Image: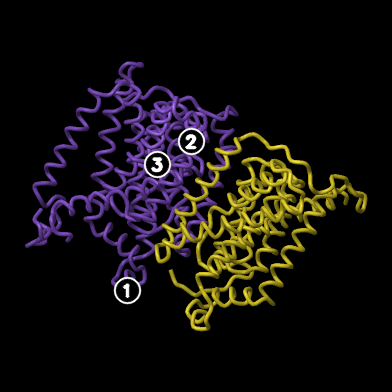
Amino acid sequence: MTATGIHHRSYVSELRLRATRAEYVRLALMGVLLVVVPFVLDNYWMSIANTILIAVIGAVGLNILVGYTGQISLGQGGFLAVGAYTSVILSDRMGLPTPLSIAFAVVFTAVIGTFFGLPGLRLKGLYLAIATLASQQIIEFLIRRDIGDFLTGGLGYINVERFSFLGFQVGGRDVFERQWYVILAILAILAVMAGRNLFRTGLGRSFMAVRDQDIAAEAIGVNLTRAKLTAFAVSSGFVGLAGALTAHYSEVVSWEKFTLEVSILYLAMIIVGGLGSIAGSVYGAIFMTLLPVVIRNVANALDSVVPFLGDQLPAVQNATFGLVIILFLIIEPRGLNRLWERIKEFFRFWPFRY
Amino acid sequence: MSQFVSMLAYGLADGAILALAALGFVLIYKATSVINFAQGEFLLVGAYMFYTAFVVLRLPLLLAVVVGVVVATVIGVLVERLILRPMIGESPISIIMVTIGLSSLLRALVQMFYGTSVKPMPKILPTGSVDILGATVPLNRLLVIVVAAVVLTAFTIFFRRSRHGIAMRAVADDQQAAMTMGISVRRIFAMAWALAGVSALIAGVLLADISAVDQNLAAFGLLVFPVVILGGLDSVPGTIVGGIIIGLLKQGTAVYWEPGLATVVPYVVLVLILLVKPYGLFGETRIERV
């Protein structure tokens, strides 16, 4: 990267994912980090790393819909539930191989997502937000009650068998987290790559056109119906994958994991990370997953000084959650991704301001 | 028949409270075009403020109401000034998210200071019951309907007759034109939030009186959405009609069909309305092709 920015001299170079040497260095560093993590972290932190990896997949999916296509969705929790229940029912009840049932869950969630995207063809902005809020409430109600009772046999939850694949089965306590880490890391990398590459294709560009100016997009030949519905389908597919993985990784499915709060948590991830940025989804997933953990550790450390923090831990975590969303939106609406760019620019142009 | 009468009383009481909560929501939307996801938390905060004044500080009822109204006004104005004003001009996603963040913050603050247990509060409204057409109807539900009707009428008169009310309607209609007429749009924004805080306070106290002072009060807030979509997002009479319809529908489902379904039926109605008539019964139709 030069001080005056990146200058492309051909379309080929413009289409490239990485233009400068610094970006290759960053990629290499991230690769090293991903490889080193399982060797240095203990089981507790590995479980958090795994949660982050699942969140990355879900956040990339949501960002495709909200950040890139501009369609607000409060129904993330419901779509996670669809993915989780579908995959578990197929693998544990019907005896399908787990990877196949996860793949099927992805497709099925994409179909359901497209169905709930139908109101998006007529509604915009806040009306769409309210419509997806209603679909979240309806899906949540269904899995809590009638369908949920039918699916779980009245228990309210389903215990999921240990993940296995072509004769390989995830091992016991000491290797459980590390083996899952490998599986989840591969899938998360694939998801990020797919997300990144999607927006180099005509389809991905049409999503962004719809977000920026839908009428103008239609005028230049973007099929709005197709673009919006595909966006819902692709996004729900990612979310379904995240849901299915949550189910198999945590080995229990119950409706509490798919409430409106989860939808809000994912929205917070992409807001904090940066709307319309795949890297931002990753930053946001890491930040929002670590936030409650860090607060708990701080509260424990300060227990003797400020016992209030430890006593009121859930409230403190929720208050910080709300405060973080508000502060990010007021101070840096484009999230951590933009913050990172600004830091880079500061050093690049130093001693000048710009 | 007796079942029908008591269903009517319970449904109207629920609907009246919903209408009050929705009124604040519509006020904010009309004046500032902000969708306030924190309306339920305004109810919650209002009820707890009143609880603090009435039970903890042992103020007489009337003074407690005044304290509650003042605090609700201050909170409304502060929220507008500190959180929503910097957001002017941002995308709807950001504005929706900021109010969601606010709702999380307010709920957590209430939990921090008051805990999660149910707070004992003496009933303000008389607890007896009366016989109407053979049905035993609790007196407090009837009084809730009366109080809500009085408050809603007062608000309507305020919008129709008073200087500030007319200024608010002018701003809702056309901000620039209102500005050129010398109306301070900023002050109207603050006033919309303050009035929303007050109407939520009244709804919160009424709801707390017929149920209990606890965290569940906030859950009522999401039911505002079916009400306002049914009535039309920017219509004050719409909130009253919408509130009553949703309230009756909830109770009707609970009595004649199945109690559990009552929580989800409003949302099914919401989806249907959005598909058939997105601007609701009284909403202003803005023609916008999507």
Across and down, in percent, residue A170 comes to 33, 21
**What chain does mark 3 sit on?**
A
Chain letter tied to yellow = B
Question: Residue visible at 48% across and 28% down?
Answer: A307
Please tell me if label 2 and label 1 are on a single chain.
yes
Question: Residue visible at 84% across and 45% down?
Answer: B127
Q: How many marks?
A: 3
Residue extending farthest to the bottom is B181
At label 3, which amino acid type do we have? Answer: Gly
Q: Nearer the viewer, residue A215 or B283?
A: B283
Image height check: is A163 above or below A196? above
B58 left or right, relative to A55: right
**Label 2 residue SS:** helix
**Label 1 residue SS:** helix
Residue that mark 3 sits on: A240
Give the alpha-carbon distance from disc 2 to disc 1, as whole Å.
42 Å
Give the alpha-carbon distance from disc 1 to disc 3, as whole Å.
33 Å
Does label 1 or label 3 sit earlier along the sequence? Answer: 1
Query: Would you identify the image quadrant in which residue A13 lies?
Result: bottom left
Pair 3/2: label in front: 2
Q: Residues within 10 Å of mark 1 (few under 14, many from 20)?
A: few
Does label 3 or label 2 sit earlier along the sequence? Answer: 3
Residue that mark 2 sits on: A257
